[in-house]
């Protein structure tokens, strides 16, 4: 399977594409990769998406560790190999246990989650699979994270679903070899 919307050579970029690419290169990501490669075809959309993602990934009200957990659940729900390859190692680095990562990859509810991890996991699973969140799970999330945290958690699910849709449609390849892969 080949990329439908692969990298654009710098000399083939419009001025708007060059500016949008440079903004990502100058930011915390440091390079244009993953979903930003196909999104570069719509530089304004890419800029807005990048700004939202920068907030959700690095500064959300639930913190980086739990944000990475939400990203993994979303990547698994969408069978998104690029998101998984990028974020599974990050999740491990920020404290998500390997057993939790492995269980999510296998579509199992991890048995050994901390309370906050279980709330995030269950919230994300319900939101993706039921297209809603039960009163119990919502109340648990609200009690732990407050309203801003709940909204940020919804935002993480929506944003990474958007990126998964972009990359699944564009058939974006995993940006490096040897990355952790989702099982079929």
Image (tube, rainbow, N blue to C red):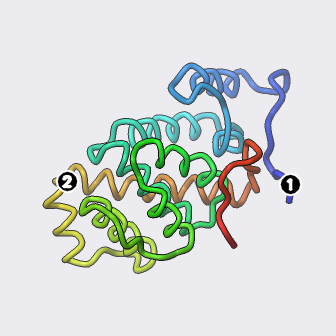
Residue corresponding to mark 2 = 145
Quick one: SS at disc 2? helix
**Label 2 Cα crowd, 10 Å radius (few <14 / some 14-19 / many 20+):** many
- Which label belongs to residue 2? 1
- Answer left or right for 87 relative to 112: right
- Answer left or right for 73 relative to 113: right
Q: Is residue 118 placed above or below 50 in the rendered structure?
A: below
- Which label belongs to residue 155? none
Quarter of the image with the C terminus is bottom right
What percent of the width, then of the height, locates residue 133? 30, 74
Q: Which residue appears at 44% of the width and 63% of the height?
A: 100
Q: Which residue appears at 63% of the width and 34% of the height?
A: 43
What percent of the width, then of the height, locates residue 101? 49, 60
Quick one: SS at disc 1? loop
Q: Which residue appears at 19% of the width and 76% of the height?
A: 136
Q: CA distance from mark 1 to mark 2?
A: 41 Å
Q: In terms of sequence position, does the residue under pointer 1 or pointer 2 come before the other?
A: 1
What percent of the width, then of the height, locates residue 87? 54, 48
């Amino acid at each position: 399977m080949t990329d439908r919307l692969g990298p654009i050579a710098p000399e083939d970029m419009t001025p708007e594409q060059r500016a949008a690419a440079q903004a990502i290169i100058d930011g915390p990501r440091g390079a244009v990769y993953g979903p930003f490669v196909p999104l570069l075809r719509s530089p304004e959309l890419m800029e807005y998406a990048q700004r939202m993602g920068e907030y959700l990934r690095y500064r959300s009200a639930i913190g980086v560790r739990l944000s990475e957990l939400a990203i993994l659940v979303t990547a698994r729900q969408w069978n998104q190999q690029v998101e998984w390859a990028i974020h599974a190692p990050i999740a491990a680095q920020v404290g998500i246990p390997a057993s939790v990562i492995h269980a999510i990859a296998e579509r199992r509810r991890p048995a050994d989650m901390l309370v906050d991890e279980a709330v995030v996991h269950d919230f994300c699973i319900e939101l993706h699979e039921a297209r809603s969140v039960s009163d119990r799970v919502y109340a648990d999330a609200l009690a732990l994270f407050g309203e801003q945290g709940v909204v940020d958690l919804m935002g993480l699910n929506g944003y990474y679903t958007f990126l998964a849709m972009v990359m699944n449609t564009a058939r974006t390849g995993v940006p490096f070899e040897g990355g952790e892969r989702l099982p079929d």
